[in-house]
Amino acid sequence: MSERSWTAIVILYLCLIYPPFILSNAASEKSFIKGDCFYYRAVIISLLHDGDLLLANNVQDRNPLDGQLALGKGGLVPKHPIIMPLISIPFYLLLRDHGLLVFNILDCIILIVLIFKLNCLFFSRLIALITTILYATGTLFLDYTYNYSPDVFSTVLVLSGLYLVLKEKFFTGAFLLGWSLFAKIPNAPLAAVILLYAILVILRRVPANGGSKEYLNFSKVGSAVTTIVIFIMALMPLAYTNYLLFGSPVVTGYQRTAIAGDAPGEVLSVDHTDRFSQPLIKGAYQLLFHHYYGVVPTNPIIILAFLGVISMRKTEDRPKLFLILTLCFIQFIFFSKYNESQSSHFSNRFLMTFVALSSVFTSNFLSYFSAKYLPGRLNL
């Protein structure tokens, strides 16, 4: 079968498992607007009803000075990125809150399909399918289908950019990587590493026959510069939003978090980035093994990914696999230092990209296992 047919099987499987899970949660009257989701929705409500991004009057049933809003030039504005609310406005207009759930479900389907396609770059389609089903069902991704998750949205952008770069579609990949920063600022180191990899691949391309050396070198440099320029251009909406809200293109809501002062009516601005002060070893251990938000207890399939890293063999895809391993390591270390890395209603949403990328190493272990014990059985 073609890869498109295998992708259709993945989507069909998701259409079988998602509705019962979502309906069971809805029947129990659980709200899918959890935690930060409330403030992302408030952005939509403020834009549609007030025509602005001043959120104090849109969060009246919450404390506006609990650290979830930012102190902007004109008042209390979003601390969190606004790209996901902007894109999901049409869904809200059609179905109100339920439209946001539909948006999130579509986002989750795209994410799982991206996991499948990413694994197909390295392994047989059957191996990729098995891994995708395991991750769609046995990880935090299933729980986050009943949500309005900025982390799912952010992970989709990172994986899309990575997949396109690995397919050597550098311009589109760079654009999506730029947007991934608009979705989540901590994506910056991931995007930088992927972009660096893209530039190295462009510059090390073996020239085809028929062109002069000077022309080919100029073409490679031109492609590399264009990739960088497209990435920078994709950052412009983020920079412009920061300028409108905070007066500087490089200042975000996380650097202007609004909290109540000691005096009545006093509003203070604090830098949320100061909360990356947890001891590294302690944070890493908790991210791995904490019973509630540790990635191993809540995503046990990831144990196969660790085995897959150990069983990595020398192949022509080894540089790409090391790129993915580096991205996993960077995100894990980054949030090991975060004091509030436990702020998730289930598992650890901050490591969602880490979990998604680990699927490649789970496939590597399954491929190694099948080659050793089931030769020829899983190589479709």
Image (cartoon, grey):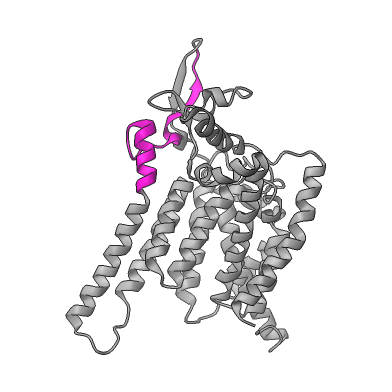
Among all residues in the image, which is located at the extreme top? 264
Say which quadrant the N terminus sits in. Answer: bottom right
Where's residue 27, x and y in %? 82, 43
Above or below residue 369? Residue 250 is above
Residue 282 or residue 39, whichever sits in front: 39
Above or below residue 356? Residue 41 is above
Say which quadrant the C terminus sits in. Answer: bottom right
Residue 230 or residue 159, whichever sits in front: 230
Where's residue 325, x and y in %? 51, 65
Residue 83 or residue 158, whichever sits in front: 83
Where's residue 95, x and y in %? 65, 43
Magenta residues span 236-262
Occupied quadrant, residue 127 = bottom right
Above or below residue 16? Residue 284 is above
Taking the spot 45% from the left edge, 56% from the top edge, the residue there is: 190
Taking the spot 50% from the left edge, 56% from the top edge, the residue there is: 157
Q: Is residue 237 visible?
A: yes
Taking the spot 21% from the left edge, 73% from the top edge, the residue there is: 218
